[in-house]
């Protein structure tokens, strides 16, 4: 316990940028970081929600700023980066958390939505990494966290664009990790399954939500705690929940035909959308 406290103390005065921080997992990560004295920049589109969270954090005596940005748009991302650098300067922790997904029949997913999923879930983290990694390497310190999903490891039906965007980010991070190996800059992918946020309803049809209600979802705070422990003890991948879930997802690559039969059974076609 003594060690734990001492280690968390190392967060004080560090600076973090958390994307998708207006609600759900990103909000929980920003609040958890801030509770240990990290200065946080919260990025999302919903300015009012961001301002409210920033104001709550400020009232508790910690520094936070809101960065309104639409991650579908490169210029909007770059404007947020300029604002970040103007206000905070360097960055210690980049948390690429913002994302969205849908589970629908392929014919019901418009191309526009597929392109936007790729932009928010994959391209935005790539753009942000390009904006901050050079300075992290120059200072030989920093940590990039990508909030991923088991969908990034194994592909289920009815979520091609989501799974592709998440697995693209896994490949990008895995490749980049080779180059960071001999530095003090870390890159971690955090894998999670169903977590109790708006995402659950916006991504899934009501049948899926009803069927999975009885299962225990992660809470956003569960995810935030794994993010903080990964910042304290850097590793390439971390899991929210049991490590066995990640192993099971990876094992599907051993026998893809058998795996796809099992996956198909678990994933009945989507019905009515819940939202
Ligand atoms: N919840 C789950 O079951 C689950 C499972 C596995 C992985 N994940 C991953 O966890 C991450 C966080 O999800 P969540 O569950 O917290 O979802 P959420 O509650 O729906 O929150 C998503 C966040 O992303 C932001 N965002 C979405 N589109 C954006 C855009 N174009 N520009 C800027 N920000 C945008 C939203 O803010 P604005 O709307 O204000 O822009 C919001 O803050 C995602 O990467 C998701 O893939 C979630």
Image (tube, rainbow, N blue to C red):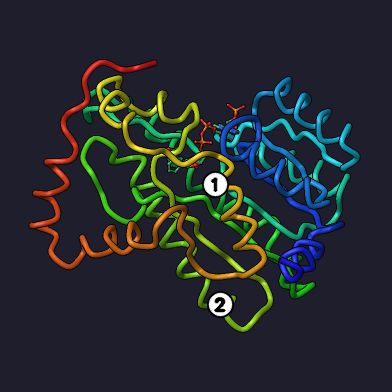
At 31% across and 31% down in the image, what residue appears?
A: 214
CA separation in Å, label 2 and label 1: 30 Å
Q: Residue at x 70, y 57 (%)?
A: 93
Q: Please rate how many residues cluster around mark 1, counting C-alpha atoms within 10 Å: few if below 14, some from 14 to 19, many from 20.
A: some
Q: Quadrant of the N terminus?
A: bottom right
Q: Is mark 2 within 8 Å of ligand 1?
A: no
Name above or below for residue 262 compared with residue 109: below
The spot of residue 35 in percent (x, y) is 78, 46
* Quarter of image, res 25: top right
Q: Residues within 10 Å of mark 2 (few under 14, many from 20)?
A: few
Q: Secondary structure at mark 2?
A: helix
Q: Is mark 1 within 8 Å of ligand 1?
A: no
- Near-viewer residue (229 or 19): 229
Q: Which mark is residue 222?
A: 1
Instruction: From the image, state whether disc 2 or disc 1 is nearer to you.
Output: 1
Q: Position of residue 257 (x, y in %)?
A: 8, 57
Residue indicated by mark 2 = 179
Q: Position of residue 110 (x, y in %)?
A: 32, 25
**Residue at the location (72% across, 41% down)?**
31
Secondary structure type for disc 1: helix
> In the image, is residue 56 above or below residue 195?
above
Percent of width and height locating residue 188: 54, 63
Name the residue located 36 percent from the left edge and 51 percent from the top edge: 150
* Relative depth, front residue between 34 and 256: 34
- Relative vertical location of residue 118 with respect to residue 176 in this rendering, above or below: above
| Residue at the far front in the pictured view | 1
In the rendered structure, which disc, 2 or 1, sits on the residue that comes first in sequence? 2
């Amino acid at each position: 316990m003594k060690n734990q406290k001492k280690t968390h103390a190392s967060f004080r005065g560090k600076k973090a940028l958390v994307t998708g921080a207006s609600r759900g997992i990103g909000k929980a990560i920003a609040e958890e970081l801030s509770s240990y004295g990290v200065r946080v920049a919260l990025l999302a589109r919903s300015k009012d929600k961001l301002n409210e969270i920033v104001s709550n954090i400020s009232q508790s005596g910690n520094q936070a700023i809101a960065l309104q940005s639409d991650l579908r748009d490169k210029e909007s991302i770059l404007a947020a980066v300029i604002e970040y650098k103007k206000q905070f300067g360097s960055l210690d922790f980049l948390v690429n958390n913002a994302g969205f997904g849908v589970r629908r029949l392929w014919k019901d997913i418009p191309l526009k939505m597929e392109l936007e999923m790729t932009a928010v879930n994959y391209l935005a983290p790539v753009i942000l990494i390009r904006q901050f990694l050079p300075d992290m390497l120059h200072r030989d310190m920093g940590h990039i966290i990508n909030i991923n999903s088991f969908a990034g490891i194994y592909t289920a039906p009815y979520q091609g664009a989501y799974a592709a965007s998440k697995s693209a980010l896994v490949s990008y991070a895995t490749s980049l990790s080779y180059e960071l190996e001999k530095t003090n800059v870390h890159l971690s992918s955090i894998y999670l399954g169903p977590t109790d946020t708006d995402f659950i309803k916006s991504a899934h049809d009501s049948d899926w939500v009803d069927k999975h209600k009885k299962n225990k979802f992660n809470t956003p705070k569960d995810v935030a705690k794994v993010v903080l422990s990964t910042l304290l003890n850097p590793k390439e991948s971390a899991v929210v929940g049991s490590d066995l879930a990640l192993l099971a997802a990876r094992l599907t690559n051993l026998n893809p035909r058998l795996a796809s039969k099992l996956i198909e059974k678990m994933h009945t076609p989507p019905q009515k959308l819940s939202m």
